[in-house]
Every structure is written in C-alpha cells, then in structure tokens.
Image (tube, rainbow, N blue to C red):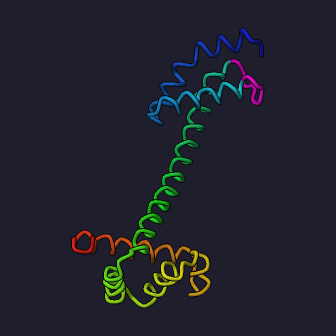
C-alpha cells in the first residue's frame, strides 16, 4: 500500500473508527490507542483487505480490539479486587492489639464452620499461601478463596456493626 493511499484511508475513516471505539470504551486515550493499532496493522501489511471492503475491515477490527480491551479490563478489575481483598486481609490479620485479636478470633470461632475456621487460621495465622492451604486441607484453591472471601465479608460487616472493634 502506498503512503498516499494509506493517508487517504486514514483521513476518510479515522473519525468513524474513533467514534465507534468511543461508544464502546468511553476513554479517549484507549480509543486513540485502539484506532492507532488497527492502522498500524494495516500500514505494516499484516492484513491486506480488498479496497471495496476496507471500511468493513477497519470497523470490525476496531470493534474486536475494543472487545479485547474490555475483556482485559475485566480481568484487571478482578485482579485489583483480589488485591484489595488481600490488603483488607492483611489489615485484619495484623491487628496489633491482643484484645482485638482475641475478639476477632472469638467471632471467627463462633460464626464460622470448622472448615472455614481452619482455612482462616492457616491463611492468616500461619501465613500460608492459598495453594498451601488448599493442599493442607485437601480442597481446591477456588474453595479456599471462596471460604476466605465469605469470611472476610462477614468480618467487615462485624467491624461496621461494632465500632468498638475499630
């Protein structure tokens, strides 16, 4: 593809491609990145669409790339959520006041089933990884995660209801 032809295609289709990306992503920088990547692939010659199908190719490429970005965002958001839960978990475990720790453990013992108690203790008191806990208890890492996630939610609710715990 010649430089002149590429520039013509760029001028003709950029704004429509950007608008499509904007309707899917709502972020100007991400939209520019998506459109630029599609044009880069076209310029490098990774794909050579027929001239009469260039608009369809460009718009489909933008849509697909936006979907990839959204999918990646979803994964990133889940990882960030897990990370924030880990921070909360570490705050719960590293309570330096013995009285508070004692009350926390009483709450755990009175409110959680035995398996959840065991998982909680292994993870936070013995500081085992999810995988180590799973192997020790004989369950999957997903099960460990689910038990810890539910128990932390209950603990957070307990903290909110009992301000004396803060």
Q: Which residues are magenta?
A: 43-51
Q: Is residue 136 above or below residue 23?
A: below
User: What is the chief secondary structure element of the magenta stretch?
Assistant: loop
Question: In this image, 37 relative to 152: left or right?
Answer: right
Q: Is residue 118 above or below residue 78?
A: below
Residue 152 rendering spot, x and y as whole percentages? 39, 73
- Quadrant containing the N terminus in the rendered view: top right
Q: Nearer the viewer, residue 86 or 28?
A: 86
Residue 61 rendering spot, x and y as whole percentages? 62, 32
Residue drawn at point x = 55 percent, y = 27 percent: 32
Residue 75 on the magenta segment: no
Residue 88 rendering spot, x and y as whole percentages? 41, 66
Q: Is residue 152 above or below residue 14?
A: below
Residue drawn at point x = 39 percent, y = 75 percent: 96
Residue drawn at point x = 48 percent, y = 29 percent: 28
Q: Nearer the viewer, residue 114 or 64?
A: 114
Q: Residue furthest top?
A: 4
Q: Nearer the viewer, residue 46 or 154?
A: 154
Residue drawn at point x = 54 percent, y = 53 percent: 75
Q: Nearer the viewer, residue 83 or 60?
A: 83
Question: In this image, 159 relative to 79: left or right?
Answer: left
Q: Residue furthest front?
A: 97
Question: In this image, 157 relative to 89: left or right?
Answer: left
């Amino acid at each position: 593809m010649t430089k002149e032809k590429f520039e013509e295609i760029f001028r003709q289709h950029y704004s429509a491609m950007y608008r499509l990306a904007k309707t899917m992503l709502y972020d100007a920088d991400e939209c520019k990145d998506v459109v630029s990547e599609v044009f880069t692939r076209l310029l490098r010659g990774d794909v050579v669409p027929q001239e009469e199908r260039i608009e369809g190719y460009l718009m489909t490429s933008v849509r697909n790339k936006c979907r990839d970005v959204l999918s990646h965002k979803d994964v990133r958001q889940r990882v960030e959520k897990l990370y924030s839960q880990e921070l909360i978990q570490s705050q719960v475990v590293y309570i330096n006041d013995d009285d508070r720790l004692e009350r926390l453990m009483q709450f755990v013992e009175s409110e959680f089933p035995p398996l959840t108690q065991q998982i909680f203790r292994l993870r936070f008191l013995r500081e085992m990884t999810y995988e180590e806990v799973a192997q020790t208890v004989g369950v999957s890492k997903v099960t460990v995660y689910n038990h810890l996630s539910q128990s932390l939610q209950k603990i957070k609710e307990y903290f909110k209801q009992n301000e004396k715990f803060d």
